[in-house]
Image (spheres, helix red, strand yellow):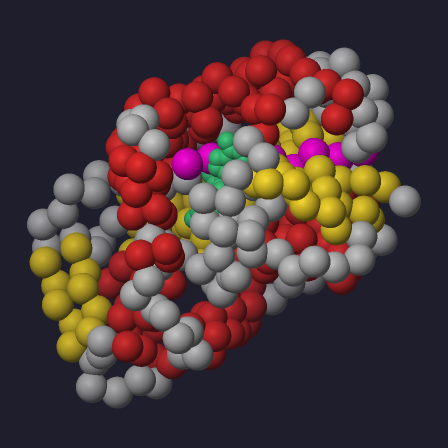
């Protein structure tokens, strides 16, 4: 049985990816996470979890794995700016150390790194993987820096997925990502706050990202080796997105507050060609509508929609303060 190591297994994406892979594939998974947001996967067959900083793993540990999926990042612009040194260590320099530990492990047939389409920053043209990245935040600058490092080293086969902004339900719920926040506010506050709202953004359903990752490890596609892919389902701006969410969820009497000024400078539109190439026969618009309704149906049942634990910035702020970092 093939073995997969998932770094950051208990995060927003990790805690839906682990059950997704176990359900759809015959793999043994080991999860590593420092549990900033708790332990979010259930104890199940073929999954073993270690609460640990990924930086503390030694070369021997990696020798039993066929695939490594790296989901560790302080993955939120304001959270990444809280303590730049801490972010630099987590998102870049400790990853370089990790790479040095695994680069000669011949068993590893793929290292999959989750980067972000935010590396494109503010870009006017329709973006594909050959477009020039223009990262703005520390988070996206470090994503790009590590991507470049992986490409220059090129010792183990890698795939870089530049994800659009994620959405969807997860055991480690996040309400600091646009679609989830809008749906939460529609359901529980009957209001939508739009800042700016005309900036274009690329969105990716978390289960869609899981489908892509599962396909990468399942089929060992040659065409994905040492390549970068932009992954997501659709582009829209927040004004249009809010209208779409209201139309699909049919929630009535929602107040929409629109503040046209914003400090958010990011705006980009990403081609979905790569996603379509990797997942054939997918009816994207139907998929998108269903994914928003599925997310709405889950969020409706959230008993603690305003828990600080569901806001990435708050969790890292508390951690840094408590540990005097
Ligand atoms: N959420 C998004 O909208 C989005 C968009 C584009 C790309 N991505 C990328 O996808 C990946 C997963 O994102 P997510 O939303 O699941 O983030 P997340 O913050 O929910 O998950 C990251 C996990 O990494 C863990 N972690 C952090 N530092 C660690 C360390 N030193 N050792 C071990 N574990 C550590 C955290 O505890 C957390 O569980 C990230 O690489 C992110 O950059 C996310």
320 and 108: which one is in front? 320
167 and 34: which one is in front? 34
Residue 273 visible (yes or no): no
239 and 21: which one is in front? 21
Residue 117 vertical placement versus 153 (above, below) = below
**Number of numbered discs overlaid on the protein picture:** 0
Task: Please tell me which residue is depicted at 58% across the width and 15% down the height of the picture.
Answer: 97
Residue 302 vertical placement versus 209 (above, below) = below
Task: Please tell me which residue is depicted at 60% across the width and 24% down the height of the picture.
Answer: 56
Give the image location of residue 19, x and y in percent: 68, 59
- Looking at this view, name the residue that lies furthest to the right: 1
Q: Quadrant location of residue 3? A: top right
154 and 11: which one is in front? 11
Quadrant position of the C terminus in the picture: top left
Q: Is 304 situated left or right of 234 in this image?
A: left
Quadrant position of the N terminus in the picture: top right
Give the image location of residue 55, x and y in percent: 57, 24
Residue 40 inside the magenta-drawn segment: no
Task: Please tell me which residue is depicted at 44% across the width and 79% down the height of the picture.
Answer: 301
Span of residues in magenta: 66-74
Task: Please tell me which residue is depicted at 75% across the width and 51% down the height of the picture.
Answer: 47
Give the image location of residue 34, x and y in percent: 52, 39
Residue 145 visible (yes or no): yes
Give the image location of residue 100, x and y in percent: 64, 13
């Amino acid at each position: 049985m093939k073995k997969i190591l998932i770094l950051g297994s208990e995060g927003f994406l990790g805690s839906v990816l682990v059950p997704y892979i176990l359900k759809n594939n015959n793999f043994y998974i080991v999860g590593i996470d420092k549990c900033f947001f708790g332990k979010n996967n259930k104890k199940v067959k073929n999954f073993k979890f270690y609460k640990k900083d990924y930086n503390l793993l030694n070369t021997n540990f990696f020798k039993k794995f066929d695939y490594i999926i790296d989901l560790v990042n302080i993955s939120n612009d304001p959270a990444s700016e809280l303590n730049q040194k801490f972010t630099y260590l987590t998102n870049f320099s400790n990853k370089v150390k990790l790479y040095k530990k695994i680069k000669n492990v011949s068993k590893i047939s793929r290292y999959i790194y989750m980067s972000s389409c935010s590396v494109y920053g503010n870009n006017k043209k329709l973006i594909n993987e050959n477009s020039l990245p223009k990262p703005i935040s520390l988070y996206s600058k470090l994503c790009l820096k590590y991507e470049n490092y992986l490409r220059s080293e090129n010792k183990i086969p890698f795939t870089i997925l530049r994800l659009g902004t994620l959405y969807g339900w997860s055991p480690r719920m996040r309400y600091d990502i646009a679609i989830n926040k809008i749906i939460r506010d529609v359901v529980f506050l009957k209001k939508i706050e739009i800042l700016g709202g005309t900036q274009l953004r690329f969105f990716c359903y978390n289960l869609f990202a899981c489908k892509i990752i599962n396909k990468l490890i399942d089929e060992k596609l040659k065409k994905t080796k040492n390549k970068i892919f932009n992954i997501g389902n659709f582009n829209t701006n927040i004004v249009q997105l809010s209208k779409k969410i209201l139309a699909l969820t049919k929630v009535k009497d929602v107040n929409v507050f629109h503040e046209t000024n914003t400090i958010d400078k990011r705006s980009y539109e990403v081609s979905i060609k790569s996603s379509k190439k990797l997942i054939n026969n997918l009816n994207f618009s139907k998929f998108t509508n269903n994914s928003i309704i599925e997310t709405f149906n889950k969020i409706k049942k959230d008993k603690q929609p305003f828990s600080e634990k569901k806001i990435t910035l708050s969790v890292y702020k508390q951690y840094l303060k408590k540990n005097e970092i």
